[in-house]
Amino acid sequence: MTDPETLVGLNEDEETDLRRRRWARDRELRAPRSPQHLSTADFLTLGNAVCGFLAIYSITTGVLMPHITGASAAGPDKHSAATAVTLLLIGSMCDLFDGLVARKLRSSALGAELDNLADLISFGIAPAYFVAVWGIVSPGQDQRFSALIALTVLLAVVLRLARFSAVKMQPGIFQGMPCPMGAMTVIAIVLLDPPFVPGLLMIFGVAYLMVSRIEYPKPQGLLATATLCWIVVSIGCLAAWAAGLPGGDTLMHVGAIAQITLAAMAPLLVIRRKVGQKVGDVRARRAESRGC
């Protein structure tokens, strides 16, 4: 009896038939599941949504409610803040891997819709809520102004996700700052607790970058590995900060400043690359015209 997984000992017709069956099996395994079934990637996407909700819950119970009841005389609980940010970093990791898993394994018909809804929770509602709570617990600040900027962040993410679904871009390109990067930059600004008005202006600038037409590369290959390493290092810095370890506050500030610097430099590097490509094209056309 011939082993169905090998081509050894088969004639030409049997070999062709086996190849066709393998191809049909692979196509079936990679075909999207029906909306009634969830794929492995969908569970990662749902994990992203759960992390977003738990981050909001952590900030509410650990920062907002103690402030309202007067139980936080020493200021916001950094453990709750660190837990919330760590949850969003884990959500970012889930968002990074769900697309990779969907491409490697079978996806589902719900995948794209679930991804947008989960991103809205973790990278839209959660960072906007952080900004609103920051305006409430920070002494002497304008709550209405912070709520307005928080609404700007939320609307920017909504528009960013809608455009991502409706506009087809070149493979490997995002239009506008990706939502996870924008969300973590907003939260980094809040963690640094800068002067109120400059801080809100910086957050507004992040919201603008998310709805801009600047083209960002998708995290693939080395870039995806670097993104994953950055998330792991950030979680470690936050854990040290929450645990009160020596230098924890410094690590948190360094991580937040690095995130803001990355968000500020990324569009400049993208624009510089575009300008360099255009200059190269102009020089190439001039060289061709001189050669003619």
Image: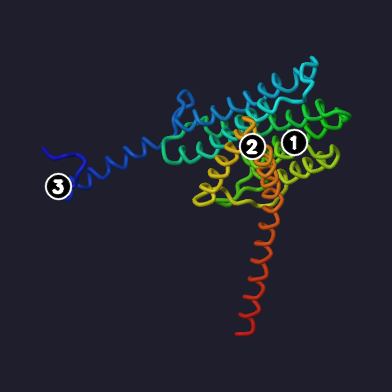
What's the amino acid at mark 3?
Leu
Could you say which disc has been placed on residue 246 in the image?
2
Q: For numbered disc 3, what is the local secondary structure?
A: loop
Q: Position of residue 100 (x, y in %)?
A: 48, 41
Which residue sits at x=47%, y=23%?
Answer: 36
Could you say which disc has been placed on residue 279 in the image?
none
Q: Give above or below for 224 relative to 289.
A: above
What's the amino acid at mark 2?
Pro
Q: Are marks 2 and 3 in contact (CB under 8 Å)?
A: no
Marks 1 and 2: which is nearer the front?
2
Residue of label 1: 190
Disc count in the image?
3
Tell me the quarter of the picture where residue 192 sits. top right
What separation in Å lies between label 1 and label 3 (alpha carbons)? 67 Å
Residue of label 3: 10
Q: Position of residue 93 (x, y in %)?
A: 54, 37
